[in-house]
Image (cartoon, grey):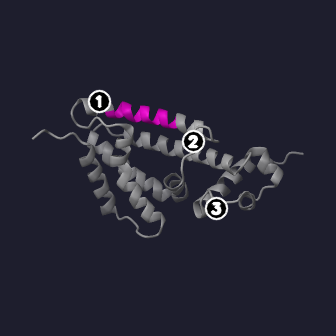
Amino acid sequence: MKSAKNGRDGRTRIIEGALRRFSQDGVSATTLASLRDESGVSVGSFYHHFASKEHVFGVLYAETLRAYQQEFVAELRRHDDARDGVEAVVAFHMRWSGEHPERARLLVSERPPRKQEPGGAEVAEARREFFRQVSDWWRPHMRNGMLQPVSPTMCYVLWLGPAQEICRLWFAGAHTPTDEEVKGLAEAAWHSLRQRDED
């Protein structure tokens, strides 16, 4: 007989347990047995939902990335002004990381699944849609001379690279960012991405 724990609730418990284990130990050091112990599900229940540890990671990574991207785009669309949007997203990134440290650590520390790996196709599709949405916001500001024409990779590095680095220190327990530092990161991102008048 199929119990409630073997249905959707079992899947949720596996995902939540995996998030704790991956965040604490890293994906490579986490064993399948520890995932089952953390979630409290049977072997049969685990394999009813997932084929492997890699499958759990792929699903968790894809779900986490999509949730982050949806909130990122929602924050960006609240701002019509180029500077306001750029700076608000840096503040959002730091706030989201503080509110979801285990999920943020997963995105910062782990290699995304490749396209042929579990979750990889979903991650690739989520990224395509995300970059399209960000480009839709970016393009008018680029045309009116406010923002630089940059590739998605350079856009990410200039916009959120320093914030990601301070998050790494934060997650390692080496430094807790202050409000003033977050404001400084946001201003630095704007100065990196704005168009400059030729001398």
- Disc 3 marks which amino acid? Ala
Quadrant the C terminus occupies: top left
Q: Earlier in the sequence, mark 2 or mark 3?
A: 3
Seen at 63% across and 49% down, the residue is 57
Q: Which residues are magenta?
A: 126-138
Q: Visible in this render: residue 7?
A: no
Q: Quadrant of the N terminus?
A: top right
Secondary structure beneath disc 3?
A: loop
Residue picked out by circle 2: 114
Q: Position of residue 84 (x, y in %)?
A: 29, 44
Q: Nearer the viewer, mark 3 or mark 1?
A: 3
The local crowd at label 2, few if under 14, some if 14 to 19, many if 20 or more residues have their Cα within 10 Å, is some
- What amino acid is labelled 2 in the image? Arg
Name the side, left or right, on which 117 lies relative to 170. Answer: right
Query: Label 1 sits on what residue type?
Result: Pro
Measured in 3D between alpha carbons, the distance from the residue under mark 3 to the one under mark 1, in whole angstroms, is 46 Å
Question: Local crowd at mark 3 within 10 Å, few (<14), some, or many (≥20)?
Answer: few
Label 1 with label 2: CB-CB less than 8 Å: no
Q: CA distance from mark 1 to mark 2?
A: 32 Å
Query: What residue is drawn where x is 42% and y is 33%?
Result: 133
Check residue 35 for magenta coloring: no
The numbered mark at residue 140 is 1
Q: Main secondary structure of the magenta part?
A: helix
